[in-house]
Amino acid sequence: MRRPGSKIFATTNPDAPNHWVRKRFLRRAGELDLAWWHSILDDNPSLDPPYVANLKSEYTGLW
């Protein structure tokens, strides 16, 4: 981002240790002056509990 005050808000899932986003940015968040947040499905209060339970039962194992 070249312009002062520019911001990017993105979602991604760079959980693998060698994922390029993780290596180039997230591991260097302090030196790059980045902020990042980690959230899980349960962090979204607008989702109905039965819907969340259904999603959790669908994605098991390698998910």
Image (cartoon, rainbow, N blue to C red):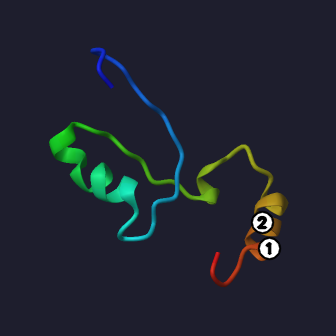
Q: Amino acid at mark 1?
A: Glu
The residue pinned by badge 1 equals 58
Q: Are marks 1 and 2 in contact (CB under 8 Å)?
A: yes
The quarter of the rendered structure image containing the N terminus is top left
Q: Which one is nearer the viewer's eye here, 58 or 53?
A: 58
Say left or right for 21 vs 39.
Answer: left
Res. 55 mark: 2
Q: Is residue 8 above or below residue 29?
A: above
Q: Residues within 10 Å of mark 1 (few under 14, many from 20)?
A: few
Asked where in the image residue 41 lies, by quadrant, the reply is bottom right
Q: Is residue 46 above or below residue 48?
A: above
Report the residue at 75% width, 49% height from top: 47
Q: Is residue 24 above or below residue 55?
A: above
How many marks overall?
A: 2
Q: Position of residue 16 (x, y in %)?
A: 43, 70
Say left or right for 42 vs 23.
Answer: right
Q: Position of residue 11 (x, y in %)?
A: 54, 45
Say left or right for 62 vs 12.
Answer: right
SS for callout 1: helix
Say left or right for 5 vs 63.
Answer: left
Report the residue at 27% width, 15% height from top: 4
Report the residue at 63% width, 81% height from top: 62
Q: Which one is nearer the viewer's eye here, 24 or 48?
A: 24
Report the residue at 64% width, 75% height from top: 63
Q: Position of residue 5 (x, y in %)?
A: 31, 17
SS for callout 2: helix
Gap between marks 1 and 2 measured at Cα: 5 Å
